[in-house]
Image (cartoon, rainbow, N blue to C red):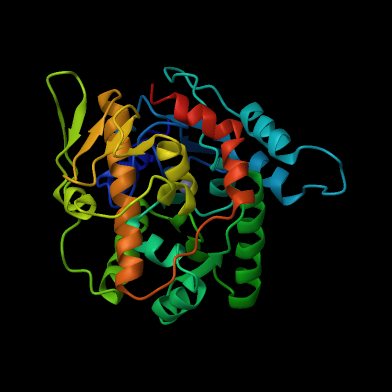
């Protein structure tokens, strides 16, 4: 059953997860609608590139999830975040041969989009999404494109983000008579959606290429590499990062004061020492060396996340733009969010 659709899910997931400039660690998610009711969506905490026909995704009744979010009664005094999460989990449809996993916390907005959805955290679109005038920039870059696009100002992920996307999509359709296929989310990332897998992959690449062209980015993205040391620690071999940190006047507070997006907190928050040696990530600003005291999976996720973050910061500065960080209310929400604690725990 649904063999072709599941193959499509694997294909779009591999395309979206193939490179750390598109997603870092277990970030990003994909989905394919299997029929008029069912949707296969990435499982929380999985890496996109690890999705296969037999693993890494969950089937849910997206029709019910969509209806739920479209008809929320906001007059009730309840925890909507919690209720909607429970509703999504209640609408998991067990499939023979599939592990019981948790659907991505972003399953809500996937349910409201076209048949195929790719959501990533690309460094290129995050130059725009983490700049003060990201909205104006995105208008300038995409105004002449045939595909409709919308901008979503930062809002807490999960329930509130789903509600905001549903609202903006329906507004765009009534104003323009077509579905917006590209969504830029401030301090977060990119969503593209299409009715075929091929179109979805192509659109994802086109959008990012267009942004690279706009910012005159012609160099390939730095290669990410870590190496195990004799004592079991890992060391960064990513030249770009070593060059960046060597001789830099930097305090650990820089990372806490400059939060660009939720995944930066999930994967790096509280885990960085500058010129110390006992944290998960230890940056030496004399030598530029980065030492990881954790397992290889977490070290690589942290390395990818750090590179993405520094790359976005550098490109924002290089283009004389101003960084737009998350506010303390916004970072507090992420710190206390059960869904993110779950995702983080999967790195162990
Ligand atoms: Zn995301």
For the N terminus, the image quarter is: top left
Residue at (39% x, 45% y) in the render = 252
Asked whether residue 37 is in view, the answer is no
Relative to residue 101, is residue 88 drawn left or right?
A: right
Work out whether residue 342 or residue 283 is closer to the camera in this orientation and state it.
Answer: 283
Residue at (22% x, 54% y) in the render = 244
Work out whether 294 lies above or below 145: above
Work out whether residue 201 or residue 314 is closer to the camera in this orientation and state it.
Answer: 314
Work out whether 208 lies above or below 108: below
Relative to residue 289, is residue 78 drawn left or right?
A: right
For the C terminus, the image quarter is: top left
Quadrant of the image occupied by residue 36: top right
Work out whether 290 lies above or below 156: above
Residue at (19% x, 46% y) in the render = 286
| Numbered disc total | 0
Quadrant of the image occupied by residue 202: bottom left
Residue at (20% x, 53% y) in the render = 247
Residue 23's x, y, as percent?
Answer: 34, 47
Work out whether 191 lies above or below 139: above
Residue 263's x, y, as percent?
Answer: 45, 43
Asked whether residue 175 is in view, the answer is yes
Work out whether residue 170 or residue 216 is closer to the camera in this orientation and state it.
Answer: 216
Relative to residue 227, is residue 325 drawn left or right?
A: right
Residue 273's x, y, as percent?
Answer: 35, 37
């Amino acid at each position: 059953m649904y063999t072709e659709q599941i193959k499509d899910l694997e294909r779009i997931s591999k395309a979206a997860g193939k490179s750390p400039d598109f997603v870092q660690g277990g970030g990003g998610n994909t989905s394919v609608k299997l029929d008029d009711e069912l949707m296969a969506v990435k499982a929380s905490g999985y890496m996109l590139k690890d999705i296969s026909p037999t693993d890494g995704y969950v089937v849910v009744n997206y029709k019910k999830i969509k209806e739920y979010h479209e008809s929320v009664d906001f007059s009730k005094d309840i925890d909507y975040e919690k209720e909607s999460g429970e509703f999504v989990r209640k609408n998991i449809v067990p499939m023979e041969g599939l592990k019981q996993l948790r659907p991505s916390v972003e399953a809500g907005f996937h349910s409201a989009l076209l048949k195929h959805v790719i959501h990533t955290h690309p460094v290129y679109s995050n130059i725009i999404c983490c700049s003060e005038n990201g909205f104006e920039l995105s208008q300038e870059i995409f105004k002449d494109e045939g595909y409709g696009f919308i901008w979503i100002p930062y809002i807490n992920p999960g329930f509130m983000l789903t509600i905001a996307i549903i609202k903006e999509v329906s507004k765009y359709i009534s104003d323009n008579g077509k579905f917006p296929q590209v969504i830029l989310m401030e301090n977060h990332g990119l969503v593209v959606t299409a009715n075929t897998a091929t179109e979805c992959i192509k659109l994802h690449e086109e959008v990012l290429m267009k942004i690279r062209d706009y910012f005159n980015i012609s160099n390939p993205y730095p290669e990410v590499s870590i190496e195990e040391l004799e004592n079991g620690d890992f060391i960064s071999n990513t030249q770009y990062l070593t060059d960046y940190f060597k001789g830099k006047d930097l305090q650990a507070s820089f990372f806490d004061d400059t939060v660009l997006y939720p995944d930066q907190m999930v994967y790096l928050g509280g885990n960085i020492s500058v010129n110390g040696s006992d944290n998960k990530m230890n940056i030496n600003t004399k030598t530029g060396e980065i030492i990881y005291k954790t397992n290889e999976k977490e070290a690589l996720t942290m390395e990818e996340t750090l590179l993405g973050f520094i790359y976005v910061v550098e490109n924002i500065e290089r283009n004389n733009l101003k960084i737009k960080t998350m506010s303390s209310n916004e970072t507090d929400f992420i710190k206390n969010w059960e869904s993110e604690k779950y995702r983080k725990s999967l790195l162990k």
